[in-house]
Image (tube, rainbow, N blue to C red):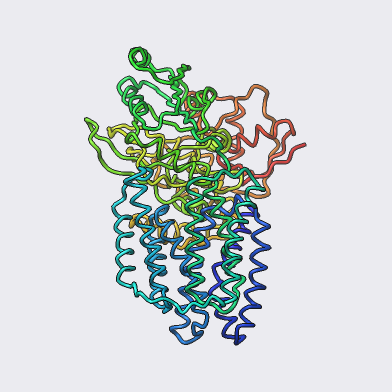
Amino acid sequence: MENYHKSKILAILIGILPLIFEFSSNIWKGDNGFFIVSAAYGLILLLLALSIPLEDLDQWFLEKTLSLLSVFLALAVVLNNLDIFPLSEIGALYQLTIISYMGILYFLDRHFNAKNLVLLLLNLNILAQLSIKAGTLLILIISVLTFVFYLIRVVVTFSEQLRPFLLCVYLIVLLISLVWYVPELPDFVLKNLSWSIGSIILLIEIIGSIFYLKVKGHLRPTSHLIVGIIIFLIINEISMLVAESNVLNTSYLVLIFILSLSIVNIFGNISLGKKQVKISVLIPAYNSAKTIVEALESIKNQTYQNWEIILINDGSQDETEEILRRYLGNTKLSLKYTKQTHHNYFKAIRHGLKYASGEIIFVLDADKILFNQNVFYRAVSTILGEKCDGMFVGIRAMYQRLKDGKFHLVRPYYRNEVSLIKTALGLGKNIYTNYAFWRREIFETSVYENYLINGMPVWYNAENNLGLRVVNGNFVGLKYRVSKKVNLGDNSLKQNNSKTLFELSTNLRTLHHIVSRINVPAYSTQATLYNLINRLHIASLYPSIFKQGQTSLKEITPLVVKNIKDSELDNVYLKTIVDFSNNFDPQKTAKLVIPKGTKIYWGTEIDEFSNKLSKNTLDQFYYDFMKIIGQGTTIYEIKKDDQKKLEQILDFFTIRDYVRIISN
């Protein structure tokens, strides 16, 4: 988390570069003052950047940096229009705006939302006010490249799915650039020493960033990296030429080096070394006789063929096994079959994982099918193309006779605290999805612990209270059947309006984890406002207010359970959590002894726990322990050997982060 906060500071310091340039030029008149301030500030940026692990200079850092840069560039223009600080370093501001404009166009593809549309409009407005020779030519070049490369990905390589709204935005930007274009060139002089030195340093920096990452980790050059670096180099070399600066701008050159490190880190892929990686498809099946063949057929028809299927029969009582046997008798598939006594969806996946050998893991529910034959190809292309832990896929409803229905596109995912706050303001509900392709090492660790064990959102890492590095695939990957009762394995898509005990417990666990380390002022008001804005589909513009600290459970837990039916609230498990929140006492202490043989429940085993609770067959320890929790007890004394067990039990009751354990 310390490095995460360092990267935030670096993003802010880069963001305010336009103001630094303008203040230095207006306060210290002449080129010398600008050069000295730029050199000093550049040194600060460089030292901070080198103190941050390369993995934190990722795509989310890059987008955050360019977003802040766009905002402060707009502020510099506003100050100029108000005659507070006249624009004196137009060339330097133009160079920064070109970088920002180019980056926002890219991230509009990755995260098509209201925030990036607003930032695009800001950049266009700034460029319109910066009058510079040949400036419109470079804007046109960037707009054409963006439009052409998007069409290539959609029409030629099929690595992306056509998104009409994004295509329209790129087309409009291209038309604006054509209207703006003025065929005038700068009076460039080869003896311009600052440009000559700067252009050489820029080239050395980009090459150096590649070698720097090569030394730090196993860098695998990809087509994404090569194309990205070449375009980035050419655009910035031209912008230096167009700006015609008479002063060597050190801060700008340091910025190029930092951005180059980010680009190489994002596209250089240092995690999956194989060119043809294998996808292990885990299919948990329970009474899936009517749907399993269609699911298998959708895999068999993929254009990307390096995959294996691990099918886990979770104690089906119908003809699932017989139908599967007949199907495999007529069709050759790379399939491993295993069977277990019926437990639950999550245990079936954990069981099947033991048989997987692929570098990428994907869970396909037996009642769903892959959207088309390019899903695996697009998934591998995305995961190998960017530094990430996994990739979300979109979902589409499927009515009878496989007729397509409503899209469920995953909202743009950001790996930052704002995503956590919005999840908390949504009362702990998963605001993204649980359907994703994963790198194996992440699935076996964080995803396994947080999702398969505790049932929290698949993208959330409770250990550091931050999201995983997941990117949006920006294509539809699955179709699901619409029926009266449907279990999608994804809380956000359940059609039954009444909340199940599983949903409530996982929502509370997620919510309590997040707000235990983040203070959300006026939680109730913010939650109401956020959900209103969310319904308008502009949640990316919501100004989340939060600070480091802890939010009182009295402010949040009652909101989650207030709409629960009284009959459901009679559940002793839920009532225990509510009572703990209302009676929270930071001084109340209890001594505990966990009897040998006591079963320790995980979050995904809440149904088993609830069934035993209703039949009064739980271990006596839990009846006594729930009374202690309900009294608001926050300090627990226990033998050191039982500390891990107690931590797991407290996590099961969603309150682990709000209590203190004293072991002896």
Can residue 578 be seen in this snapshot?
no
Side of 124 relative to 588 (left or right): left
Q: With respect to residue 619, does 473 lie above or below?
A: below
In-front residue for pair 21/210: 210
Which residue shows up at 45% across the image and 33% down it? 362
- Position in image of residue 393 (x %, y %): 40, 41
Residue extending furthest right? Answer: 664
Q: Is residue 157 above or below residue 555?
A: above
Q: Residue at x 38, y 76 (%)?
A: 184
Residue drawn at 45 percent across, 79 percent down = 78
Up the image or down, 426 lies above or below 175; here it is above
Q: Position of residue 172 (x, y in %)?
A: 30, 63
Q: Which residue is rendered at x = 60% and y = 83% of the image?
A: 31
Spot occupied by residue 630 in the image (x, y as percentages of width and height): 57, 41
Image quarter (top left, top right, bottom left or bottom right) of the C terminus: top right
The answer to which of 297 and 241 lies nearer the viewer is 241
Quadrant hosting residue 593: top right
Residue 132: in sight, yes or no? yes
Residue situated furthest front in the rendering: 190
Location of residue 589 with respect to 646 vertically, above or below: below
Task: Tell me if 589 is positioned left or right of 524 in this view.
Answer: right
Q: Tell me residue 641's x, y (percent).
A: 73, 31
The mark tally for this picture is 0
| Residue sitting nearer the eye, 645 or 585 | 645
